[in-house]
Image: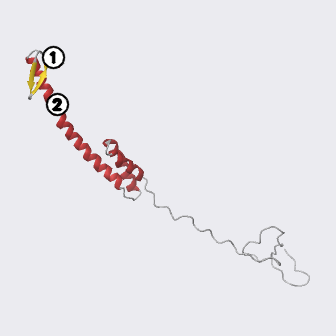
Amino acid sequence: MSTPPPDGSQQPAYNPPPPAQGYPPPAQGYPAAPGYPAYSAAPPPTPQYGAPPPANPGRTMGIVAFILSFFVQLIALILGIIALVQSRKAGQKNGFALAAIIISVVLMVLGIIIAFAVVVPLISLSVDTLQACQAVDFSGTVEVHGIPIDCSTVSR
């Protein structure tokens, strides 16, 4: 409880003491003390950078999958699928992951076709060679599919 001053004048409820030499000025909202200039509040800080772009968690993995799709198709296919799923969950598109999946599948199918095109004739040639060499008791030379073969070099 405060008592009114003896002269009858009304004083404010709080009158801060004047700042001592070297101290900062009073905070905004309080009047400046007599003999001191009024300072305004500091302006709000300006943003240094714009808002970051939305994160695409599968982008880096999609790029890695794209590069690997030319060399290691199975790993690239798995990484591409994972990257595509992560990007879709974040609501983003991932062209690298999609391209990695497509390239990996196409190259794997081509690899299987080429493997059958090369392996099947080689197996057929080796079976025919073995049968021809057995017929001459693994001695001498035989001709299989137009190719002369020395049966002494054929293993039994």
Quadrant into which the N terminus falls: bottom right
30 lies left or right of 82: right
Q: Secondary structure at mark 2?
A: helix
Residue 117: % across, % down:
17, 37
Rendered position, 23 above or below 60 = below
Let me know if residue 58 appears in the view. no
Give the CA distance from mark 2 to mark 1: 19 Å
Q: Residue at point 35% right, 49% down?
A: 66
- CB atoms of marks 2 and 1 within 8 Å: no
**What residue sits right under mark 2 in the picture?**
122
Frontmost residue, 20 versus 13: 20
36 lies left or right of 52: right
Which numbered dot is residue 111?
none
Residue 63: % across, % down:
38, 50
Q: What amino acid is labelled 1 in the image?
A: Ser
Frontmost residue, 140 versus 42: 140
Q: Residues within 10 Å of mark 2 (few under 14, many from 20)?
A: few
- Number of numbered callouts drawn: 2
Residue 93: which quarter of the image? Answer: bottom left
**What residue sits right under mark 1 in the picture?**
152
72 lies left or right of 116: right
Q: Secondary structure at mark 1?
A: helix
Q: Residues within 10 Å of mark 1 (few under 14, many from 20)?
A: few
Quadrant into which the C terminus falls: top left
Q: Residue at point 77% right, 68% down?
A: 24
Q: What amino acid is labelled 2 in the image?
A: Leu
Residue 142: % across, % down:
9, 21
